[in-house]
Image (tube, rainbow, N blue to C red):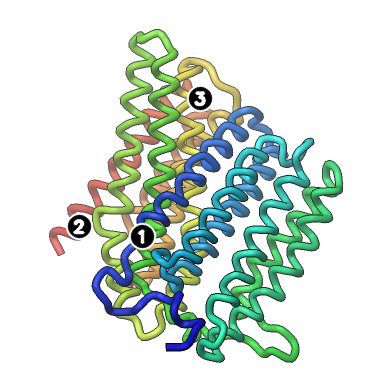
Amino acid sequence: MNTGATLLRVRGAHDGDKVGMVELFFDLVFVFAVTQLSHTLLADLDVANALRVALLLLAVWWVWIYTSWVTNWLDPERLPVRIALFVLMLAGLLLSVSIPQAFGARGLEFAGAYAFMQVGRTLFFLWAIRGSERARVRNFQRILVWLLLSAVFWIDGGFAQGDARLAWWTTALLIEVVAALAYFWVPGLGRSSTTDWDISGAHLAERCALFVIIALGESLLVTGATFAERAWDAATVTGFLSAVVGSILMWWIYFDTGAQRAEHRITHSDDPGKHARRAYTYLHSLIVAGIIACAVADELVLAHPHHGETAALVVILGGPACYLAGTALFKWSTSERRGPPLSHLAGLLLLALLAWATFALHLSPLAAGVAATAVLAVVATWESLALRRA
């Protein structure tokens, strides 16, 4: 076996494709990152801050999913890989700590940590696979070029201020988002193909499912912490129960059948890289965004059950809508369906009608939150009964 290949996973071996303990340990950094994102959104619900938080969320997701792709190939039980993950954890903590002030005093720290993680991880991978198959090496050489280009915009944005920083970082993120869509095409190096991304579908599916668990866990953490600080009157208890049931329903909608069906599809696909790019790399960001918005909504309902501003009501209804849209697209892309699940489309329609009723009838945040949870219950029940009957 050549030197580079010794750090690669052994496909088909016992536990060869399982998520390692060090990968789960690495994910703890992103529990903190998700908490930082939800608190940053909660601190200011205006449109400008929502856009900033959305950009930061995509950055956090992008650095995590790229790392998950890399550990899909590399064996985290090998000492060099393990050490590399620990270094990335340290950088990830700096990135997470910087989130609340990423558009303020800690912009350069956020950008530097992000660029270091993206570029440094790719350089390590190229070292780890030296002497490996030419297609794999060439693929990551192309990725490195794209990430070096985006790093320039991240660092420039760190030195900029206000709207200029937002513009720089939006450009940087767009470069990375477009990169995979363009198959990392580089003049002189050509472009990759999805068949070059010979991943373990089961591993990546499990990694993304675990991130969904992380986000749901943060939602429960926010709910429990907020409820513990409030007086336990009827409104607070109702809001608490609605929030917990809502989290359970979001788990049910994703994990009851959708996650298993998607894993089966990617595991048995002739081109798992194609499914991984669309269903797990891109569409899961919508699912995670919806869960984070729901966590913010739960805290808003518990803190102000009777009176809420328009922005708060938008989050209370928008969070479930984003989550349903993400899961609908995910299930559509990982099945033979001709369209998204009818239950999810019905849920989105009910949420649209609920939004009209909320603003027309001046419903309270508590009433809107309970009604949104009821919509999730309709979707979960409808889909479960329909699939079991089939």
**Pointers 1 and 3 in contact (C-beta within 8 Å):** no
The percent coordinates of residue 352 (x first, y second) are 47, 43
> Circle 2 — which element?
helix
Q: Is residue 255 above or below residue 336?
A: above
Amino acid carrying label 2: it is: Ala
The alpha-carbon separation of the residues under discs 3 and 2 comes to: 34 Å
- Of tags 1 and 3, the one toward the viewer is 1
Residue at point 42% right, 64% down? 76
Give the labeled residue for mark 2.
386
**Where, by quadrant of the figure, is residue 238 drawn?**
top left
The alpha-carbon separation of the residues under discs 1 and 3 comes to: 36 Å
The percent coordinates of residue 123 (x first, y second) are 64, 71
Q: Is residue 78 above or below residue 21?
A: below
> Circle 3 — which element?
helix
**Pointers 2 and 1 in contact (C-beta within 8 Å):** no
Give the labeled residue for mark 1.
20
The percent coordinates of residue 95 (x first, y second) are 64, 46
Amino acid carrying label 1: it is: Gly
Image position of 203 (left or right of 79):
left
Image quarter hosting the N terminus? bottom left
Residue at point 63% right, 58% down? 117
Q: Residue furthest left?
A: 389
Q: Residues within 10 Å of mark 1 (few under 14, many from 20)?
A: some
Give the labeled residue for mark 3.
300
